[in-house]
Amino acid sequence: MSDPAEEQDLPAGNSEASERNQLERSLGRIDDDVPYHSLALDVDQGDIWGKIDVVSRRVGEWFNPILVKEARQSLKSRQFVITFFLLLLASCLWTVLGVVLNAPDVYYIPTGDTMIYGYYWVLAVPLIGMVPLAAQRSLAAEIDDHTFEMLVITKLTAMRIVMGKLNSAMLQMLIYFAAVVPCLAFTYLLRGIDLLTIFTLITILFFTALLVTSASLMLATLTANRAGQTLAFVASIAVIIFAEIMCAAFILGEILRLGVKSEEMMFTALFILVGVSCIALFVKVAATRIAPVTENRSTGLRYLMFLQQLIWAGVIGFLMLWYEDRDVVNFGTMVLGGYWLMMGTFMLAESPELSPRVQRGLPSTFAGRALMTWLNPGPGTGFVYAVATGTAGIGVLALFGLLVANADTLTFGMIMIGYLAGYLGIVRLIAMPLCRRFGRSVWLPVGALATVLIFSLMLPTVITVVSTGAPGNVYTPIEAMNWAWTIAKGFDRRLPPTVAFSILATGGLIATLNLALLFREFDYRRIAVPQRVLDDSAAE
Amino acid sequence: MISKAPFLSWDGPVIELQDLCRNFGDTRAVDHVSFTVPRGSVFGYIGPNGAGKTTSMRILATLGLPTSGDALVEGLSSINDPERVRARLGFMPDSFGTYADTNCAEYLDFFARSQGLIGRERTRRLRWVMDFTGMRSLASKPVRGLSKGMRQRLCLGRALIHDPAVLILDEPAAGLDPRARIDLRRIIRSLAADNKTILISSHILTELAEMCDRVGIIEQGELLATGTFDEIRGTLRQNRDVLIRVAGTTEAALRSLATFEDVEVKSSEEHRVHFTIDGGDHRQMEVLRVLVEAGIELLEFSSKDDSLEDVFLQITDGRVQ
Ligand SMILES: Nc1ncnc2c1ncn2[C@@H]1O[C@H](COP(=O)(O)OP(=O)(O)OP(=O)(O)O)[C@@H](O)[C@H]1O
Ligand SMILES: [Mg+2]
């Protein structure tokens, strides 16, 4: 190894010899009599099995290392083996039980449609319930046991680590699914259920499981301390229960009862569309959480949020035209308002200090600076980005609503924009000094948001009680602060336009006040990449 | 292998800490530490518990952020270019976790894959690492069942798997038996001979003395001294204790010693004189020459050579946390 240039020209065998020399120099004794572990040996491609080995190894190189490792681990893991056999047992039991209960009918009446209810649960419990929890535990345990640090300093990128965990979860899903496939085939043979229904059921289950798993993985990366991990675990369980209920309601209540018609197909397709964008967002959040702190952890997410808004607007527009119903639009704008309020609050926790590494990637042209500054990390840019993008999305949807309704969607859009700008502005005004005092933590703005939302629900009632002596049950202009009541009114189309205007105006005022406080975040300019880094990337 | 050539083309210091600081609340874990390590040399990082060794090594290994200052590996910042630094770095932390249901070979294979090694390259590195760390016969053992010393070997193997140019070893000798310590020393020297740059921490000075080219002594986050052992000893011990034993009476010897201004006689017994010289090797030789030229029958002339522990205690004297 003395001269690297010399070594380059030598075939691999020779450099092995030189490593061997080095070994003998340093150790003087090598356990030559002990055979190497098979993983350390090249495959001998002599016979047909050797050839298969070569091919399978070559295929193996393409897989994510984490997937390879976890597949090996789970083959030896007792928990996995037990779960798998319990699953087999459950499906066998239900098969026997179902056949016995339907005893004579089985032979001449289609019973597949009743059998499938049991198989649904046999599949839904492990897929949506256990796989996400296992994935979350596996990531949280790595962080807990400090194996994670050894992982992040390898060549694996943060994204590959998260994808590796997600891939292992998918592998588990496939294995569980494989155990139930014979039962599903059996159900089909019993008649009473068509292939399309079975296929839709499986698709929805898989996507829900994937969605919940990515959410659980994201939750696992949010905090590293014990209390936070417990909280994340509880949150995952809540998500899982919610997903189980929604999935059961849709599959058992709609699809299995009514069959798959155009409406069900459309809902499945839209669910997958929105689901994929959520999976992308969750995975990206998880990856940014574990990426180096000096990296730009925000711009990529901001692009994804924008993409998600586009998908959402498309979905809502489609549904609105399908049902010709303005409530769909109002629902869509309400979700957008909540979405940007939440995302904006998260972005308020970002640091206004940009690392040199981030500054290297900032836009440099004038046009770039004018348009893209809002994508730079930082609480101020995040505020503007959330309010501006949210306003654009809500505005477009509300205008689009004019196709099926009169101006009510506009009124509703105005209150959502006003609330978004106003509440996010107030949260920012509260969180800014707090963050400066106690250090940056996502809990400060989130806490501020929760406080503001609860406070604004109660304040109008308190004022009414103090001034009139009794809580009023009539909507007065002062209730404009009460977002829940106002939104309900908006849905009922009984909101005076003046209230909507004043909400919009107040929100605009608070947002303008915030704009004045943006300070130095806009002073950041692109800095040059150090020469050493340029040289190094040229050498790669 | 082609990627190695540009790595070696960097001829500045391979490891460089620039005025590194890290505070945890009021604790100054690392306080304005700067040093450099050239290619192919071994730098020993010595300090008592809580001195800030682990903290600064983790920053260098891209696992922590400094409050201020920078840590560079081959001129690249661990803070702003962690990916580039990671590619050339092998890090062995002082404590590390392991995976359940995994054996040593699978563990190493996993990290080899994670480092992007494929095909024959990977199997070759695996064989080399297993031999180099003496893990060949342990390959099928479950990682969770390894003893402390075996785990240290495995961890070293993991750090070496991608043949990094720089190694950061946080107390690699902790928990090793004497034989394994000797092995470790040989391994370190062999890696250094192979042009690897190594930063190694320990509390045990004698251990580092034999494998390090230079050492840095750190306490309460401050780097108190850097240099070779002899340099550190030289700068520190300006006056040294000398003990002589003479055949006859001590009278003549005392008379000769009195001619030196900087010699201070501590005690004199029947055949022995204990005195201190204000100076290093040079002064000591001069005193000896004068005594011999004066015809004094010297049976013994010994300067008390401080053990490394003494150096350590002396430097860190009075500042133990
Ligand atoms: N995560 C942390 N939070 C708070 N304080 C910390 C943290 N990590 C280290 N410290 C403090 O920083 C100081 C330096 O710790 P460090 O682990 O670097 O010492 P060390 O030299 O490695 O000690 P040892 O020889 O015991 O391993 C200690 O006072 C320690 O309490
Ligand atoms: Mg330590």
Image (cartoon, helix red, strand yellow):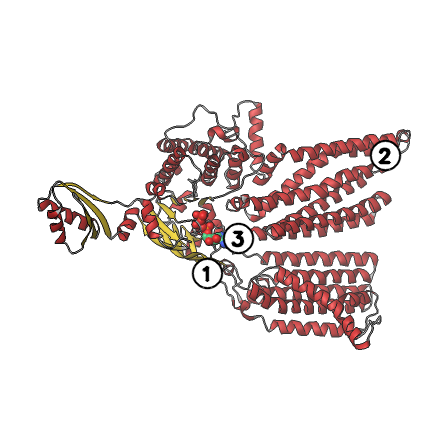
Give the structural element (helix, strand or loop) at label 2.
loop
- Rendered image: mark on residue B214: none
Viewer-nearest of discs 3 and 2: 3
Ligand 1 near label 1 (Cβ, under 8 Å)?
no
Look at the image and tell me in which quarter the N terminus of chain A lies: top left
Above or below A325: residue B149: above
Q: Mark 3: which secondary structure?
A: loop
Q: Which residue has dot 1 on it?
A: A528
Using the image, name the chain to which the residue with label 2 belongs: A
Q: What distance separates the C-alpha of mark 2 from that of mark 1?
A: 69 Å
Q: Is residue A170 left or right of residue B39?
A: right
What percent of the width, then of the height, locates residue B141?
53, 30
Q: Position of residue A90 (x, y in %)?
A: 77, 33
Q: What amino acid type is highlighted by mark number 2?
A: Arg
**Mark 3 vs mark 1: in front:** 3
Can residue B64 be seen at all in this image of the molecule? Answer: no
- Res A434 quadrant in image: bottom right
Residue A200 appears left or right of A132: right
The residue that label 3 is drawn on is: A292
Q: Residues within 10 Å of mark 3 (few under 14, many from 20)?
A: many
Three-letter residue code for mark 1: Ala
Task: Tell if the residue under mark 3 belongs to the same chain as the one under mark 1.
Answer: yes
Q: Which residue is mark 2?
A: A191
Q: Is mark 2 within 8 Å of ligand 1?
A: no
